[in-house]
Image: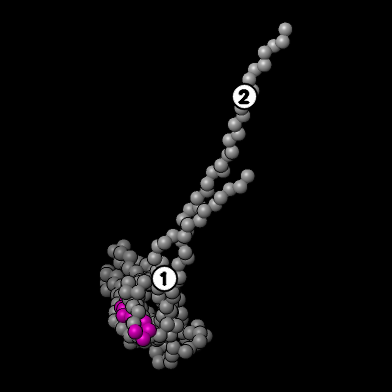
């Protein structure tokens, strides 16, 4: 018994999908530390603290958000998110990838007690930037040093510099041809017709 299977290719237009992979590294470094796009491993540099190294995939022209924060309690029961937030919008340009964005860095600025009053200070920095890069190219964004005050017992002033390392990679995915469901024809059964023979008369 044979079965006939029919396949129909979908006659629909196929489009490739293009996305941009944004790899980021946030590092807290001593002021004056030299870091370039060709620096192999930030964590190997003395005094450098890599805070996070996330990766996101963004459609060209769309906004992507990277947020690395932790909650810090404040007087009155408030909770303040400390850390980094990066808003970035990459687009396809004639000579590579154009990008623009904003980095927000919030850190504790100091604690102090004034009589019966407890005070916690936070410092927030916003950095706006834009530029272009080739696919696979790494760029480095240096921010101005921030000053962190110590507590009443430790009045030492410490400085830190936030460095943001960004790598942009264009990725194109070709869609696979879409096929319609297989249509299976039911097997055709042959019909056999049997002619009835005339009944024979009984012979006495």
Q: Magenta stretch: residue 95 in it?
A: yes
Q: Magenta stretch: residue 168 in it?
A: no
Looking at the image, which residue is at 54% across and 43% down? Answer: 186
Residue 16 badge: 1
Mark 1 to mark 2 CA distance (whole Å): 68 Å
Q: Quadrant of residue 16?
A: bottom left
Marks 1 and 2 in Cβ contact (< 8 Å): no
Q: Quadrant of residue 119?
A: bottom left
Horizontal and vertical percent position of residue 147: 33, 84
Considering depth in this image, is 113 or 3 the residue closer to the camera? 3
Per the image, label 1 sits on a secondary structure element best described as loop
Considering depth in this image, is 188 or 142 the residue closer to the camera? 188
Q: Which residues are magenta?
A: 94-106
Considering depth in this image, is 153 or 183 the residue closer to the camera? 183
Looking at the image, which residue is at 32% across and 74% down? Answer: 61
Looking at the image, which residue is at 46% across and 56% down? Answer: 180
Q: Quadrant of the C terminus?
A: top right
Horizontal and vertical percent position of residue 170: 42, 78
Horizontal and vertical percent position of residue 198: 63, 20
């Amino acid at each position: 018994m044979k079965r006939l299977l029919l396949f129909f290719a979908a006659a629909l237009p196929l489009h490739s999908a293009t996305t941009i992979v944004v790899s980021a590294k946030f590092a807290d470094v001593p002021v004056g530390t030299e870091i370039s796009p060709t620096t192999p491993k930030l964590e190997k540099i003395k005094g450098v603290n890599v805070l996070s190294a996330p990766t996101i995939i963004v459609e060209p022209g769309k906004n992507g958000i990277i947020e690395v924060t932790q909650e810090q309690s404040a007087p009155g029961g408030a909770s303040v998110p400390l850390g980094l937030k990066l808003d970035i919008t990459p687009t396809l340009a004639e000579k590579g990838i154009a990008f623009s964005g904003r980095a927000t860095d919030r850190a504790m600025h100091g604690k102090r007690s004034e009589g019966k009053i407890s005070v916690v200070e936070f410092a927030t920095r916003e950095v706006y930037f834009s530029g272009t890069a080739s696919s696979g190219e790494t760029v480095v964004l240096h921010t101005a040093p921030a000053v962190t005050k110590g507590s009443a017992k430790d009045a030492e002033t410490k400085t830190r510099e936030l460095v943001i390392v960004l790598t942009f990679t264009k990725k194109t995915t070709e869609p696979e041809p879409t096929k319609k469901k297989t249509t299976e024809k039911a097997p055709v059964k042959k019909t056999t017709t049997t002619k009835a023979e005339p009944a024979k008369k009984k012979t006495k």
